[in-house]
Amino acid sequence: MQRYLLSRLIQSIMILLAILVLVFFMVRVTGDPAVLMMPRESSPESLAAFRHKMGFDRPMIVQFADFMFKAVQGDFGNSLHYKTPALPLVLKRLPATVELAVGGLLIAVLVAIPLGLVAGSLPGSFWDSVARGLGLLGQSIPNFWLALLLIFFFAVRLRWFPSFGRDELSSLVLPAIVMGLPTMGALVRLTRSAVLEIRGEDFVRTAYSKGLRSNLVYVRHILRNVAIPLVSVIGVHFGYMLGGSIYIETIFSWPGLGQLVEQAIGWRDYTLIQAIAFFTSLAVVILNLLTDVAYAIIDPRVRYGN
Amino acid sequence: MAQSTIPAQPDSGLVIDQERTWMHQLKYIFGLLVRDRSGTLGLILFLILVFSALLAPWIAPHDPLLQNLSNSRLPPIWSEGGSWEYPLGTDNLGRDLLSRIIYGSRVSVTVGFFGVLIAAGLGLLVGLVSGYLGGRVDNVITGLVNLVLALPYLLFVVFIASILGRSLINVVLIFGITDAPIFARTTRGEVLRLRESGYVESAIGIGASRWRIIFDHILPNLLGPMITVATFEMSRMIFYEAGLGFLGLSVPPSVPSWGNMLAAGRKYLIASPWIATFPGLAIMFASLGMNLLGDWLRDVLDPRLRRIKK
């Protein structure tokens, strides 16, 4: 198991280094990063001055080494808009995004897992239809549209929740529902099909035939096996949620990472976007790694197999 | 299975010609489709999408770009003040929403179709090389594919789109290239599985060349999984294109597209909610249709992945 985790750790570090390389070259694909970062009507003189100030006039290899050396220490340079280091600006947005991600995940898990269990145990029932409908909706509803609909009905018409901002807990409800819905759909589908599959396994029949009570069969045999695929989906989805949602945060004026991305694009603040892209990727990579650790703990086949 | 030819009856000694076999297969698959209600619904939604894109100039009641400020923000037909002239109402510039949605499907279908074409082409090539050659080449390619799949996809797409600027070709290229790893991974997995199969081993045994094995035995068997993945990925691209449009990063604002319409309708959400509602519904039905179709294709074309029967 230690060897497995060590190789996954090395892999993760490689991925992060590769992401830094990608982020470095991305602002240079159009040729001149100065043109990209400066306002459209900039004069050639101010472009040249900017190029010199940012070090874009140095040889590419020097720029690259400089960028990588500073980036691994968390230094992405100054935000072009705020004129202050990019990293603290990103970190400042983290609490709001984490709050939204946790809210979305909680809603998704609390609805999806019970519903999926019932649907898988009673195929063809009313709850099964609800589960299958939710599974499809979660995949097909665009979150930016759902956000607008919820604002219209629950904030404007019914006035149950605030339509934007981040004040009391009630302002979290609508964005968290929108955030959680795709995950909810995926988890319902997965739980339902996992229960259906495991119910037919030999060890479940054996458990029943030796006289174990139904709820004990569920807890000891079915739930434990359903948990394995769920862990990986929850881990991956939570990683993406921690990157913040550009749409949800923009529409609900939620002051997290996603809103910062949208603003930074408007300001052409590409040093800030580079920092956000790296930290969002970091969240995804760390969550993937933790998911693999959890996997190895729950599933003995992974632990001994590799 | 769409790809296998139907074996001739052992006692008949006849070879069934290729054309009849194909007809037989199509009929068989169509029969399965009609029996599956959600698959049928998926196909119908998909056909509506494709036909509205192909026939937009003939079926749209109005010019999607024609502005008429005296008719601005008319409500849809079923609410007070609506008329048959504008069944889904008009936007803030008095343009017919139904016509704009019909024309908007052209952007979605173009991005979905050509995006998938590029992604599948690149992915097929890379996946074949990776799965067939193995060794160090395979390690490097697999590493790169895993890297791209580990990225926060949407953020990077938004990042690239904001750098390259608004144009249809840019959007198609972005999705075509960034989505190739999904096809590469599928291809590689299938190639690895097929290489171990009895018929490929026998083909190697009787001395078939590498190219012959790839063209006669591997490519035909890749068709099923590729079509399934293509359906899901096309749905995803249509979804993300609308998302980019909503942020003002897809096609130019003058082009009617579902994402652009939604972004414009957002400003009038409280007074005229229908402007944002209908393009959103269009995105949802397109995506729903292709997901249903994809689920069904996965069951029919690949029995190994068949879900537990409902």
Image: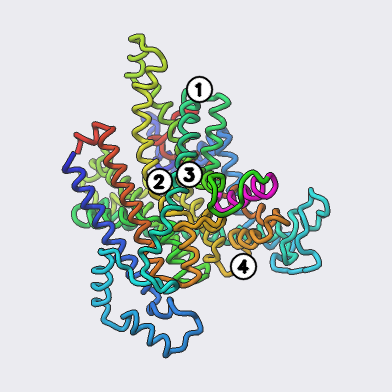
> For the residues marked 4 and 1, what is the alpha-carbon distance in whole angstroms?
48 Å
As for residue B18 lying within the magenta part, the answer is no
> For the residues marked 1 and 2, what is the alpha-carbon distance in whole angstroms?
29 Å
Kind of element beneath mark 3: helix
Magenta highlight range: A142-158
Q: Give amino acid for label 4.
A: Val
Q: Give amino acid for label 1.
A: Leu
Mark 3 Cα-neighbour bin, 10 Å: few <14, some 14–19, many ≥20: many
- Residue A122 image label: 1
As for residue A146 lying within the magenta part, the answer is yes
- Residue B95 appears anywhere in the view: yes
Residue hosting label 4:
B255
> For the residues marked 2 and 4, what is the alpha-carbon distance in whole angstroms?
35 Å
At 30% from the left edge and 51% from the top edge, which residue is drawn? B214
Residue hosting label 3:
A104
Residue A4 position, x and y percent, is: 19, 43
Residue hosting label 2:
A238
Residue A241 position, x and y percent, is: 43, 49
Query: Taking B168 as reference, is A32 above or below it?
Result: below
